[in-house]
Amino acid sequence: MNASTIIDDTMTLEEKLKAIDAAMANAQQQANDDAAARGQVAAPLDPADLTMCEGCQ
């Protein structure tokens, strides 16, 4: 997930937080849908995973 596609410098802090919450909810719903299609249960996303690059994970 690329933060620059979700938030920008013109947004207020409250708008940024709402955008991040919406992106996280969307990502979780996508994970739920993908898992359901495979007959599995999706694990909830760890918000910390969204704050570091893939190389750091």
Image (spheres, helix red, strand yellow):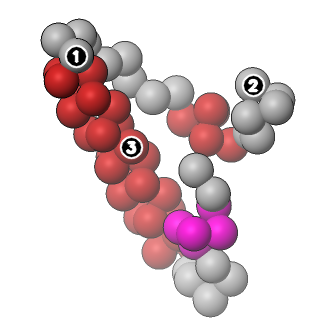
Could you tell me what secondary structure mostly forms the magenta stretch?
A: helix
Mark 1 vs mark 2: which is more N-terminal?
1
Mark 1 vs mark 3: which is more N-terminal?
3
Near mark 2 (Cα within 10 A), the count class, few <14, some 14-19 or many ≥20, is few
Report the Cα–Cα distance between label 1 and label 2: 25 Å
Q: Which residue is mark 3?
A: 27
Report the Cα–Cα distance between label 1 and label 3: 17 Å
Report the Cα–Cα distance between label 2 and label 3: 18 Å
Disc 1, disc 2: CB below 8 Å? no
Disc 2, disc 3: CB below 8 Å? no
Vertical placement of residue 45 versus 23, above or below: above
> Residue at the location (18% across, 24% down)?
37
> Amino acid type of disc 2?
Gln
> Amino acid type of disc 3?
Ala
Q: Which residue is mark 2?
A: 57
Q: Is residue 26 magenta?
A: no
Residue nearer the viewer, 18 or 31: 31
Residue nearer the viewer, 47 or 39: 39
> Amino acid type of disc 1?
Arg
| Helix, strand or loop for disc 3 | helix
Query: Residue 13: percent from the left, percent from the top?
Result: 57, 72
Give the label on residue 38, or none. 1
Q: Which residues are magenta?
A: 3-7
Instruction: Nearest to the eye among marks 1 and 3: give it.
Output: 1
> Residue at the location (33% across, 49% down)?
26
Q: Is residue 16 left or right of residue 2?
A: left
Disc 1, disc 3: CB below 8 Å? no
> Residue at the location (76% across, 40% down)?
53
Query: Residue 38: percent from the left, percent from the top?
Result: 22, 16
> Residue at the location (18% across, 22% down)?
36
| Helix, strand or loop for disc 2 | loop
Q: Is residue 45 left or right of residue 7?
A: left
